[in-house]
Image (cartoon, grey):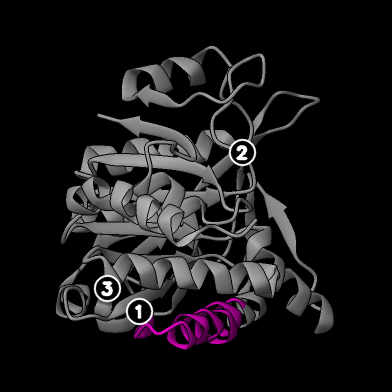
Amino acid sequence: MTLSPFDIARVLSEALPYMQQYDDEIVVVKYGGHAMGEEQAARSFARDIVLLEQTAINPVVVHGGGPQIGDMLKRLGIRSEFAAGLRVTDAATIEIVEMVLAGSINKQIVGFINEAGGKAVGLCGKDGNMVKARKVSRTIVDPGSQIENFVDLGFVGEPETVDTTVLNEILGRELIPVLAPVATAAGGGTYNINADTFAGAIAGALRAKRLLLLTDVPGVLDQSKALIKQLSMDDARRLIADGTISGGMIPKVETCLYALDAGVEGVVILDGKVEHAVLLELLTDHGAGTLIHR
């Protein structure tokens, strides 16, 4: 469908109050999932990010790359295992993780944003000591014995400190930071961090207006599988307790709660496969996922 010039002008006019609401505010977008593997979708995402920057919003992109890491490990004949929902990262794997996340994926996203007219800067948590991490500890319950066992995930970390010095120098200067979730260990070395967790820590440290978690699902669903448009923090905790929020959605919602506690105004879980999902969420009254707020 081709819009008339009148329709285009009307749409732009209706977006004005939302542009004013986010004027000069920071929006952290976690980008991942299947959309990252499709070039046309990635280019569309890049254009949307450039549009945000052009409307005086300060976007920060944090990306994942699990499928791409898995493909590279397979090509190199390195076996990869998962436990407690996280990739077990040994010494051989962490080299590939850093190469793929901070290298090829990061620079591809930077390239798409720059081709769309933006000025993206590719970084990871190690740059400027932005993120220092501690080792993640996890336990899993044996289904037979119901005994909890400790799982060594290797070089998998979680944010311990976030230094926003580098980001503060970049934001507000027509530059768009693109961050890979790789961080420095307190005693040296490298840790792989879950991209949702990394994005939550960055958004909290920046006291972002919004954190958008682009996923492969529409958002948080109720027990009849209908989308829940808004949740308070107490609502979210209640839905975790009664089992409505389950499986892989639990750590995503816990990341949202952590970010809100750290000072983020609102966090949205939305489907990154929907074209222009970021614009639908920020610049229209339609919304595109589940907003969790304080």
- Confirm whether the magenta stretch covers residue 113: yes
Q: 10 Å neighbourhood of mark 1: few (<14), some, or many (≥20)?
A: many
**Element class at badge 2:** loop
Q: Amino acid at mark 3?
A: Met
Nearer the observer, 151 or 25: 25
Sequence-wise, the earlier of marks 2 and 1 is 1
Q: Mark 1 near mark 3, Cβ–Cβ under 8 Å?
A: yes
Viewer-side residue, 71 vs 50:
50
What is the quadrant of the N terminus in the image?
bottom right
Instruction: Tell me which segment is drawn in magenta.
Output: 97-122
On-image quarter of the C terminus? top left
Q: What is the total number of numbered labels drawn onto the structure image?
A: 3
Residue depicted at x 21% and y 79%: 170
Question: Mark 2 highlights which residue?
Answer: 248
Check residue 130 in the rendering and tell me which mark sits there, or answer none.
3
Horizontal and vertical percent for residue 145? 76, 24
